[in-house]
Image (tube, grey):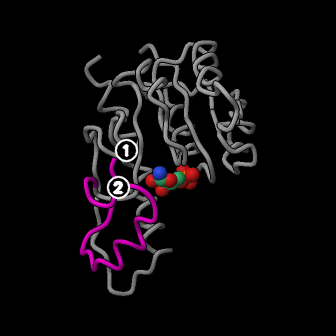
Amino acid sequence: MVKKNSCIFISGQGSNLKNLILNSRDNNFPIRISLVISNNKNAIGLIYAKKYKIPFVWIDTKAKNYENKILLNLRKYNISFICLAGYMKIISNKVIRNYQKKIINIHPSLLPKFKGLNTFDRMLKNNEKKAGCTVHYVNEKLDCGNTIVKKFFFISKKDNEVDLKKKTQKLEYRAFPEAIIKIFRNS
Ligand code: GRF
């Protein structure tokens, strides 16, 4: 199998990045993680890029033409597939246009419910019965692209925001690799 050169975008903890790196070490996993991009130079997740010797770049999204710097790096590393894994910045249309149907995101809710931020707080306030995660394609509209994989669990009466995050992330570590395998299964 020829692995696709892929880039993971992060902003924070990077636990999904770590999980994808570990999955990608399997010969049968369809992607190779060739680059990590962070908009936060202090992102904890960058330790995984360092530990596994993956090139990483910090992009200052306040800088003029920062999208060009993203695109230049994606070209430099021959990137053909992008995963947003806790990237807390809206990806610009310029990048999306260059990578149509090649960018996926993981979101901590059962989309189309609870797009955007603070999902767990809103779920609890809304007395939701179910929570979970969605892996979806990225298009110009926030959290709106087609779903690839969705996983859920039932919220218990005792669950607080921390519990919901823990339970959701446990599902994310299965959903993200599953989505990637599903995308490349027939290629
Ligand atoms: C994940 O829960 C994901 O759903 C959301 O941001 C979180 C990132 O966590 N988009 P981590 O940085 O991968 O630990």
Residue 185, numbered circle? none
Cα gap from disc 2 to disc 1, whole angstroms = 7 Å
Question: Which is more toward the observer, 70 or 102?
Answer: 70
- Secondary element at tag 2: loop
Compared across the picture, whether 65 is left or right of 5 comes to: right
Q: Circle 2 sits on which residue?
A: 115
Q: Quadrant of the C terminus?
A: top left
What type is the residue that disc 1 sits on? Leu
Indicate yes or no: mark 1 CB to ligand 1 under 8 Å.
no
Nearest to the observer: residue 96 or residue 111 = 96
Residue on which disc 1 sits: 142
Q: Is residue 127 left or right of residue 15?
A: left
The residue under the point 65% across, 39% down is 38
| Magenta span of residues | 111-134
Whether 164 is drawn above or below 29: the answer is below
Crowding around mark 2 (Cα neighbors within 10 Å: few <14, some 14 to 19, many 20+) is some
Tell me whether the residue at label 2 lies in contact with that at label 1, contact meaning CB atoms closer than 8 angstroms. yes
* Residue 85 pos. (x, y %): 51, 44
| Image coordinates for residue 153, horizontal then vertical, percent | 29, 67
Amino acid marked by disc 2: Lys
**Residue 128 drawn above or below residue 105:** below
Comes first in the chain, label 2 or label 1: 2
Give how far across and how far down residue 28 sits, in percent: 42, 26
